[in-house]
Amino acid sequence: MNIGFVGVGSMGRAMMALLVEAGHQVSAWNRSADALAGLSEIDVLASAATAFQRPVVISMLADDTAVREVLLESAALKTACDGCIHIVMSTLSPALMEQLQKEHDEAGLVLIAAPVFGIPAVAAQGELNILTAGPEAAIDRVQPLFDVLGKKTWRLGEQPVQACIAKIAGNMMIAQAIESLAEASSLAEHYGLGASAFIEVVTQTLFACPSYQRYGQNMVNDHFEPGFKLSLGLKDVNLALQAAEGRGLNLPAAGVVRSRMEAAVANGLGNKDWSVFSNRTQLKRRQA
């Protein structure tokens, strides 16, 4: 397929490499051209709008603000070729996703939401879990791309916002898992049981799943080089709380997690892995 790619961070680079390796033609645009350095098999585009001259566009922009600036305020969608399918793989607010649906309908574009569970190292192996929602026929058309990028495509409905909220809710759960590990291991340590022994037990028995295992080891080893930056994790927890407020829901555990993440960002840790907010020194400080 001939694919336009908009927004090239570490996830985007991993995805594009796999797509090229699979024989697809990829052209890309990024606000910082430095992000495209060394990608010799990628055609560099002059603008985001140019990407929409391709039959399929994948966007991986960082947040709502970037999407509004790059795709909406620039009127890039209005330049799209006939039948263009736009796959939004960013984690965005439900409100913006619904606005994007309206804008795409008006411009005659097809919108698919396809956020993912996985970090760049997982993306590089083509092992992402891809959460999709949008018109079934359009997803069928781009399924070969998802087969390259992920180990499983989860089809969640016809409305893109359905995949959007699944990703937000899932990331909220991961943040709460990190908080749970921090509190539980701190409790164990205060009764003479080392955090390493405790985390090994629970991540091999009750919580034998990748998130607990990965972030538990980060805590044990005091190693917080990103996978997924704390600043982005805080963005996603804020999205969950805003989405809940929009439906009159109260998410108290998410509020606790946000406070801890905000404190860690204020301490200059925003570019560390998001599990850094589990630091038990911060937990003791909060309890004092």
Image: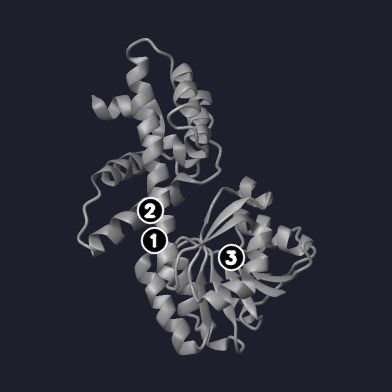
Whether residue 266 appears in this view of the structure is: no
Report the amino acid beneath label 3.
Gly
Residue 43 visible here: yes
Q: Is residue 49 left or right of residue 220?
A: right
Regarding mark 1 in the picture, which secondary structure is present there? helix
Identify the mark nearer the N-term, 3 or 1: 3
Would you name the residue on which mark 2 appears?
Answer: 169
Q: CA distance from mark 1 to mark 2?
A: 6 Å
Q: Along the line of sight, which residue is nearer the eye, 129 or 16? A: 129
> Which residue lies under the disc numbered 1?
165
Q: Secondary structure at mark 3?
A: loop
Q: Residue at x 49, y 73 (%)?
A: 134
Compared with residue 73, is residue 205 higher up or lower down, i.e. above or below?
Answer: above
Q: Which is closer to the viewer, label 2 or label 3?
A: 2
Q: Which residue type carries mark 2?
A: Ala
Q: Which mark is residue 7?
A: 3
Residue 186, x across and y down, in percent: 35, 22
274 to 82, vertically: above or below: above
Q: Looking at the rendered structure, which numbered label has been put on residue 249?
A: none
Q: CA distance from mark 2 to mark 3?
A: 23 Å
Looking at the picture, how far across and down is residue 140, in whole percent? 60, 73
Query: Is 99 positioned to the left or the right of 83 in the image?
Result: left
Three-letter amino acid code at the position of disc 1? Ile
- Is 280 left, or right, of 58 in this rendering? left
